[in-house]
Amino acid sequence: MRIGIIGTENSHVDHIIDYLNVERQAGDTRVVALSGGRSERNEKLKTIGGLERLVDEPTDLLGLVDAVIITDRHGGLHREHAVPFLTAGLPVFVDKPLACSEADARAIVAAAREYEAPLTSSSAVRWVPDTDALARDAATLGTTQVVTTTGPADPGSEYGGIYFYGIHSVDVALRLMPGEVGAIQVERIADTITATATVGAARIVVNLVVPGEGGQVPFHGMVVGRHGIAARKLTLGPSYVEPGLRAFLEMAETRRPPISYDDLVRPMRILDAIVSAVGP
């Protein structure tokens, strides 16, 4: 399978090229082209990965690749970059966040559905071993009552504000608590933004802490069940990009998305509510 990448400023691209082209972990599947022209970074990535070509515009990849990975840091670019490839029926992996609004997320998903093009998007924290372990622990606690996640997020980020890092804590919370998102309340106290939402028959609480001079809080998750509590620090190891990439590769082969399209949109509703309450 020939893969093209859009949005190469993200360090995730280095991991992807190393996994597919340098280590050849997926056999003949490899990155063959990057969009963004002949920048210094793209030339370096081309050399490291032995890529075939660089193209100027994202749509220049059409006809050259079998699938696309979109890794723009700013999620506001994702709708524009994803839809042409979904319209062409190609498998698309949009790195976090899927978009910077629920409206854009729904438009991306609508294109995937209309043209039967497999689509996925997720936070890398969703797939780390600690999150998997927390999900297993939660299943032993009886009916889930409350899910609480905590992580860093900066409303002033140039890459889409809260959406850029807030997606991590929201995505994990919703992985741990399936169901329809109901009423959402948001408040900010000092440097922490807290979103509380009814989800299904339970509640999620997402704490987003603005980073400071001393660094940022780690990702953390806690599940309160009917008869127990489980909690874990959610650590991003050196290979944190790989689980989501493997899920995408399997999707491209089977054309079965690993996450339902409704679940791709759910985080955007909460992030939109946060932005509406406290700003971008």
Image (cartoon, rainbow, N blue to C red):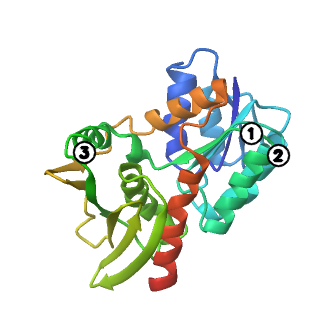
Label 3: element kind:
helix
Residue holding disc 3: 138
Contact (CB < 8 A) between labels 3 and 2?
no
The tag earlier along the polypeptide, 1 or 3, is: 1
Mark number displayed over residue 171: none
Q: What residue is drawn where x is 77% and y is 39%?
A: 116
Q: How many tags in the picture?
A: 3
Mark pair 1, 3: CA separation? 33 Å
The tag earlier along the polypeptide, 1 or 2, is: 2
The tag earlier along the polypeptide, 3 or 2, is: 2
| Residue 7 spot, x, y in % from top left | 64, 50
| Residue 208 spot, x, y in % from top left | 34, 69
Label 2: element kind:
helix
The three-letter code of the residue at mark 3 reads: Ala
| Residue 228 spot, x, y in % from top left | 13, 50
Nearer to me, 240 or 261: 261
Tell me: residue 98, above or below residue 129: below
The three-letter code of the residue at mark 2 reads: Thr
| Residue 34 spot, x, y in % from top left | 70, 40
- Residue at the farthest left position: 228
Q: What residue is drawn where x is 38% and y is 34%?
A: 239
Contact (CB < 8 A) between labels 1 and 2?
yes
Tell me if mark 1 has few (under 14), some (14-19) or many (20+) residues whose alpha carbon lies within 10 angstroms of its own.
Answer: many
